């Protein structure tokens, strides 16, 4: 009787001759990995909080659990600027204009504990979230050229934004510090803070415009204000609406000489999709991206931008081509009937995850952990519709994500790693992060990747 080793060796040898080879090169190192994440800004934390307790736990575990969910580890909160708290608004802690730009601001307590973002932050941290990013869509209206926190406008005091009421940069910086300290009093550390959101746009909701030079004009005030307050929170800039819009603002900050004062470069994926890496030594996150099509629960049906397979490719290219260190989808869970959320909430009890959630699970903490390094991974032989990324975790484990964009199954072999235990995870129209096994012989593993699927190898 043939031994299992002989049988496995024979199978692997046959597969190596027949199909594509994934060659992993641990010695080729790229960027460090920070994590994946979501936001629940604009009161979607409230929507989650209003679920019944059983459904509330289900949605939180779907988002943050690294054993049953997507394993997100970054949370982006909205730093409010609205004077009121109607639904879809984020209320400010400084809604009343002081007597002057140099007068003491009458800070108010959080409304409903920052519209349940304090609650969500605590719940997320208890489930493994390690990084909190607070981002302001705008300064308060009285600090801006047009007097409202919506419809764009500029922060008074930056280049080409002179206001009769004076320079409001220091007041805005003071408000941000107070917000961070309010979270600190609840035992929550804000690791990064942003003061802009899509500053290239003028929108009917909270928005504030800024060039790179104008962003630098505020950074020169905010940075020493954070330092003086004894905070370790780092500045994020500038959440451009698209990759090229952000590149323009980053270049402006660099030319003004304030790149060293920021700790994180942030961009969205709307106006222009992520492309070539930014020219910066700083961490780079894609901090918001989704689609606004009708709600789509499919993995692959027509190849539309709202399907799960499309988002698997988006995330893989972000890490593998754009060299981001972190990726955040827009909303994690919401009651909106479009693709802004990964999980659809209907009423107080219905929670339904989309396939896009499971695409993100392959790049979340279930397989890849903070501090991991992206390493070399290529497909040789008949690569065809296959694409691949690989990450080496600090605990010695390795995750390799293989996407098959073709209709036919591809049997692949994995080489270049020391293989002890190899587990596979499959997501496609029929499977949600389903556990399987590869055939292993020595330093080679083999597995079939079905058509239109994402399969990850996890080697430990």
Image (cartoon, rainbow, N blue to C red):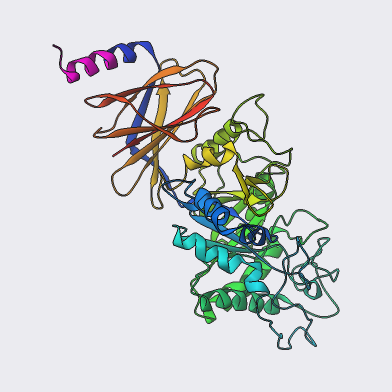
Give the image quarter of residue 86: bottom right
Give the image quarter of residue 452: top right
- Measuring 15% from the left and 17% from the top, which residue is drawn there? 3
Residue 402's spot in the image, x, y percent?
45, 29
Observer-nearest of 59 and 31: 59
- Measuring 68% from the left and 52% from the top, which residue is drawn there? 240
Is the stretch drawn in magenta largely helix, strand or loop?
helix
Is 6 colored magenta in this rendering?
Answer: yes
Query: Is 384 drawn above or below residue 339 in the view shown?
Result: above
Query: Is 152 drawn above or below residue 316 in the view shown?
Result: below
| Side (left or right) of 376 relative to 431 | left
Residue 231's spot in the image, x, y percent?
50, 76
Residue 147 visible in this rendered orientation of the protein = yes
Furthest toward the left, the residue is 1
- Measuring 46% from the left and 51% from the top, which residue is drawn there? 65
Instruction: Count up the numbered dots.
Output: 0
Query: Is 323 drawn above or below residue 152 in the view shown?
Result: above
In magenta, the rendered stretch is: 1-12
Residue 331 visible in this rendered orientation of the protein = no
Residue 33's spot in the image, x, y percent?
44, 49
- Measuring 64% from the left and 24% from the top, which residue is drawn there? 301
Give the image quarter of residue 377: top left
Quarter holding the N terminus? top left
Residue 228's spot in the image, x, y percent?
53, 81
């Amino acid at each position: 009787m043939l031994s299992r080793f002989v049988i496995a060796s024979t199978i692997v040898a046959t597969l190596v001759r027949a199909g594509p080879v994934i060659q992993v090169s641990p010695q080729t190192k790229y960027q460090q990995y920070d994590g994946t994440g979501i936001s629940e800004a604009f009161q979607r934390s409230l929507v989650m909080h209003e679920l019944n307790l059983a459904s509330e736990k289900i949605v939180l575990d779907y988002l943050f659990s690294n054993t049953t969910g997507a394993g997100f580890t970054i949370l982006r909160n909205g730093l409010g600027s609205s004077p009121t708290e109607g639904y879809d608004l984020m209320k400010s802690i400084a809604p009343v204009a002081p007597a002057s730009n140099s007068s003491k601001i009458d800070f108010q307590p959080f409304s409903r504990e920052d519209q349940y973002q304090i609650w969500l932050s605590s719940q997320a941290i208890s489930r493994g979230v390690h990084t909190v990013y607070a981002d302001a869509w705008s300064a308060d209206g009285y600090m801006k050229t047009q007097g409202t926190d919506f419809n764009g406008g500029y922060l008074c005091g930056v280049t080409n934004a002179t206001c009769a009421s004076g320079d409001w940069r220091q007041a805005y910086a003071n408000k941000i510090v107070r917000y961070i300290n309010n979270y600190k009093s609840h035992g929550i550390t804000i690791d990064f803070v942003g003061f802009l959101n899509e500053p290239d746009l003028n929108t009917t909701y909270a928005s504030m415009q800024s060039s790179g030079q104008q962003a630098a004009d505020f950074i020169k005030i905010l940075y020493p204000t954070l330092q003086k307050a004894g905070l370790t929170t780092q500045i994020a800039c500038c959440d451009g609406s698209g990759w090229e819009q952000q590149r323009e603002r980053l270049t402006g900050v660099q030319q003004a000489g304030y790149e060293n004062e920021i700790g994180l470069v942030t961009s969205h994926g709307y106006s222009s999709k992520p492309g070539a890496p930014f020219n910066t030594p700083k961490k780079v996150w894609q901090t918001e991206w989704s689609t606004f099509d009708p709600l789509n629960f499919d993995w692959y049906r027509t190849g539309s931008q709202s399907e799960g397979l499309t988002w698997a490719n988006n995330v893989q290219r972000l890490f593998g081509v754009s060299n981001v260190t972190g990726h955040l989808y827009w909303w994690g869970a919401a009651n909106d009937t479009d693709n802004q959320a990964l999980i659809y909430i209907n009423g107080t009890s219905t929670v339904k995850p989309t396939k896009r959630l499971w695409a993100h699970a392959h790049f979340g903490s279930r397989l890849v952990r903070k501090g991991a390094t992206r390493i070399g991974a290529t497909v040789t032989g008949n690569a065809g519709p296959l694409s691949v990324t690989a990450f080496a975790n600090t605990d010695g484990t390795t995750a390799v994500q293989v996407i098959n964009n073709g209709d036919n199954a591809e049997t692949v072999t994995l080489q270049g790693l020391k293989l002890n235990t190899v587990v596979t995870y499959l997501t496609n129209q029929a499977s949600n992060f389903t556990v399987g096994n590869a055939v292993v012989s020595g330093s080679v593993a083999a597995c079939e990747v079905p058509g239109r699927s994402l399969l990850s190898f996890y080697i430990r």
